Image: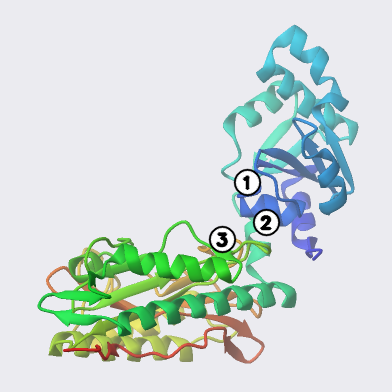
Amino acid sequence: MDPDLSRLDETLTELDVDGYLIDADSTNADQYYLSGFDAPDPFLTLYDGSVRLLFVRSLEFGRAKRESRAETVERFTDYGYDDYLEDHGRTEAAHRSRAAFLDAYGIESVAVPSRFPLSTADGLRNQGIDVVVDDGETVTGIRARKTDAEIDHIRAAQQANEAAMAAAEELLGRATIDGDRLLVDGEVLTSERLKEEIEVTLLRHGCALDETIVACGADAADPHDRGSGPLAPHEPIIVDIFPQDKATKYHGDMTRSFCVGEPDAQIREWYDLTERAYRAALEAVEPGATGSDVHDAACDVYEDAGEPTLRSDPGTETGFIHSTGHGVGLDVHELPSVAPGGTELEPGHVITIEPGLYDPTVGGVRIEDMVVVTEDGYDNLTDYPVSLRIESLQA
């Protein structure tokens, strides 16, 4: 996939610089997107109308020439690093080699992303290179609008996600209720056990994730609490899975809330209200609408029912206490924002819709799908039932 970098060309013109520079390893999504190369150690990517890579060592040199989208692939040693090292030490030698690399392509000024390493920036400035921060985060913005190929990658990650969610739901369905505990095969069912089932399923589908959320009771009242310990019957269990495809690096994201046994009236009311907010937000998704518009649609449902939101009460610690969604791609959280101040949605934007309600005295519920904005609305990339109650094998 060769990205359309015309917006990056425009940024170079607007900032009056000769090139765009990234210094990071490939876990930095902008680095991976621009270079087209996966490497565990930091390397330099220069865009000056062409993509050019510079590596500290030769370890990745051959593979980068084969696999990256770069016009040129070079090493520090090609730019005097060994001589600089003897005379100036490692840090200064690196600064001088980077400057020599830029000089070879006539680069006297560069734009860099806001999280560019300070040491690299200062070192280049000391070598006479003008370094300007790209406050607009241009590459991140370019990444937000997905190509058809990227959408296919995200769809595949979401299909793996659905398989993992089904495995989690199946395990919950096997549970028996024993007082205030859930048992599976005679053992207490824990958050950790459910996460293991999710992660093993994802691995079998070519995906992985470092963490997932399986949170029950008071844990579920914190939207980012990963959850731990025994899972309880009759209480909401939030399962939020956000895997990354190991081959393509693209993510999926989905949340469902389950209850094994009989949820009380408060939880049923919360769930029904959250499903209404989720469907209202989905209906608001279309090109030309803003992320703020979509967020407002969810807030309207909650506020009309008397539930607090951050829009109605910025200091609230209960109710709807987060944004309605976010972009998904090489990062699990990226542009565009589906929140107050969220900008215009465009075809190709992949976003989540995930309203929820939270209170430590009750727990929490959340429903999340992932959709792509189309020319006339949206396409839901999530094909998984929305349902709260799971029948236990034994009440």
Residues marked 2 and 3 touching at CB (< 8 Å): no
Residue lying at 37% horizontally and 82% vertically, measured from the top left: 169
In this view, the residue in front, 85 or 165, is 165
Give the CA separation, mark 3 to mark 1: 16 Å
Left or right: 129 in relation to 282: right
Q: Earlier in the sequence, mark 1 or mark 2?
A: 1
Pointer 2 residue: 139
Task: Give neighbour class at mark 3: few <14, some 14-19, many 20+ (Cα, 10 Å).
Answer: some
In this view, the residue in front, 292 or 204, is 204
Give the CA separation, mark 1 to mark 2: 8 Å
Residue lying at 61% horizontally and 62% vertically, measured from the top left: 330
Pointer 3 residue: 331
Task: Give neighbour class at mark 2: few <14, some 14-19, many 20+ (Cα, 10 Å).
Answer: many
Left or right: 349 in relation to 263: right
Residue lying at 52% horizontally and 84% vertically, measured from the top left: 382
- Element on which disc 2 rests: helix
Q: Is residue 172 at least partly visible in the picture?
A: yes
Give amino acid for label 3: Asp
Q: Position of residue 338 (x, y in %)?
A: 46, 73
Pointer 1 residue: 113
Residue 365 image-quadrant placement: bottom left
Give the CA separation, mark 2 to mark 3: 13 Å
Residue 115 image-quadrant placement: top right
Q: Is residue 127 at least partly visible in the picture?
A: no
Give amino acid for label 1: Pro
In this view, the residue in front, 224 or 131, is 224
- Element on which disc 1 rests: loop
Left or right: 100 in relation to 386: right
